[in-house]
Image (spheres, helix red, strand yellow):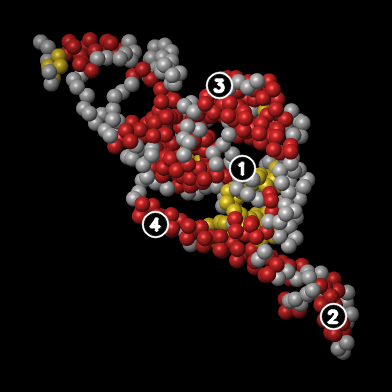
Amino acid sequence: MDLEVKGIGTASRNVKRQKSAQGWRICSSDAYGPRPDDVPALDLRRLGDSDGEESPVDEVSPEGLTSLDEKAIQQQCYTSKPYTAEQSRKRSEAEDLAAQKKKQAVVEQVLVDQLSRAVISDPGQDASTTDLSQQQTSLPGLGSAPLRFRNRKLHQTKVKTSSTLTENLLSNKLRFDARIISRNGRDACRELIGFFFAFDKSLTVYEYRQFGKNRTKALPFIQRGIYCHQYGRRKRRQYDVGDFHVGANLTFLTAQHVGLPTSVQEKPLLTLRIIGIDEMAKHSLLTSSNPALSKQEIDDRNIVMSVQGLLKEKLKKRGVLTMTGLVRFFHQRDQCGGGVLQKMELRQGLKEFHLELSNKDFESIWLVLDQDGDGEADYYQFIRVVIGEMNEFRKAFVRKAYMKLDPNKTGSSSVNDISKFYSGRKHPKVLSGECSEQQVRAAFMDTLKESCVSSDEVTYCEFETYYEGLSLGIANDEDFANVIRNCWAV
């Protein structure tokens, strides 16, 4: 006698069990009844067969886009602001006030450090101590030991000498914000504030650090000194006020700077990108003698813009998967882990992702990159030159989102944490009821994982690379900012 539970006979169950033993197959929904509206459809085509058969190739649309491309394009649909105008204004004002407090704290620390150092290290202090020792030796009972064997006390320091720095001299400065160009997430998220002093053309860079919840301190990162460019067409030329603008790079030899983080010292060159500047101070310091771009620099810029223009249309709809795939392709060929590849390997990567350049264009780009003539180039820099990169306005939002995911600044965040923080509530397709928030989140995680080496965590570099690709298809800066705001509530 056949027993029947909830309308399903044992005979029919045996048939289904036999079918399932043969591997996963797409079954009609009629066999199980209608699917509830709030339950997303299960795409069984994405699962591999249990008997070793290869999983089907990702479907390609008539436009040449795969399903992953379509999922990535979904993230470009955010256009609405996450808050009302009043809430957005209050949030912006609060962030501006916090930033101003940070900068003021660093300015005060710099003045204290530089004035104190100038007083103690001033050669005039030796003369003052010599005068004091001569007065002491004239008194009975005191010996005449050499100066190097005597201890100079703080109360014996001559506070003012003829060459002592003054606050007035140090106030004639240009303040700028900077970040480290690095694949290391901890370094890339460091908050750096620099100063260029007009009276002697020296510069210094400080790092704003937070210790615990309430203790903050500004610490020297690059000691004050007169420095020169270490890379590019201006190599060995001293920095001048004209070199400081948003998007400009400052390069330093790490071997010349004691106390840099170990992760920074691993590279021979430290590159800082200027992300903000005091325009009023710069305007007051500008003179007619400031250097303009040379003809070679103008030619380099025109070459880069021309090549990026050629590839822009190809990347408009496939930016995410092309960018992340290109990085993984180069990473797999970087056997030494130094971040550099040879000319042919870089060209092969472009060909692999259908970004071929003519011989003339590629050779022109190579001359811009390989200025040292060693036959190698940093492949991240190669991508930035050939494809382009987000502007600093967009990168600031990406860093802000990642710092929320990685508050301890370890340089990586778990996939689970990212999935928990991601919000799809304000996506247009969710608001219209076309798909669920879970489906939007799953689509985002699918495309993000394509850029990751590990299946369990996402590094800062991988997170930034994903948004570099997404940025290629978003023309307006505010639209891109709204994507980040809606997803991560920053």
Q: Which residue is under mark 4?
A: 90
* Residue 181: assigned label: 1
Q: Which residue is under mark 2?
A: 131
- Which element is circle 1 on? loop
Residue 174 occupies quadrant:
bottom right
Residue at (24%, 14%) from the top-left corner?
28
Left or right side of 402 for 229: right
The mark nearer the N terminus, 4 or 1, is 4
Q: What separation in Å lies between label 4 and label 1 (alpha carbons)?
A: 31 Å
The furthest residue to the bottom: 140
* Residue 353: assigned label: 3
Q: Is residue 366 above or below residue 218?
A: above
- Which element is circle 2 on? helix
Q: Where is residue 465 in the image (x, y as percent from the top left)?
A: 53, 35
Residue at (78%, 70%) from the top-left corner?
163
Q: What separation in Å lies between label 2 and label 4 (alpha carbons)?
A: 60 Å
Q: Tell whether label 4 touches label 2 (CB within 8 Å).
A: no
Q: In this view, does 89 lie above or below 129?
A: above
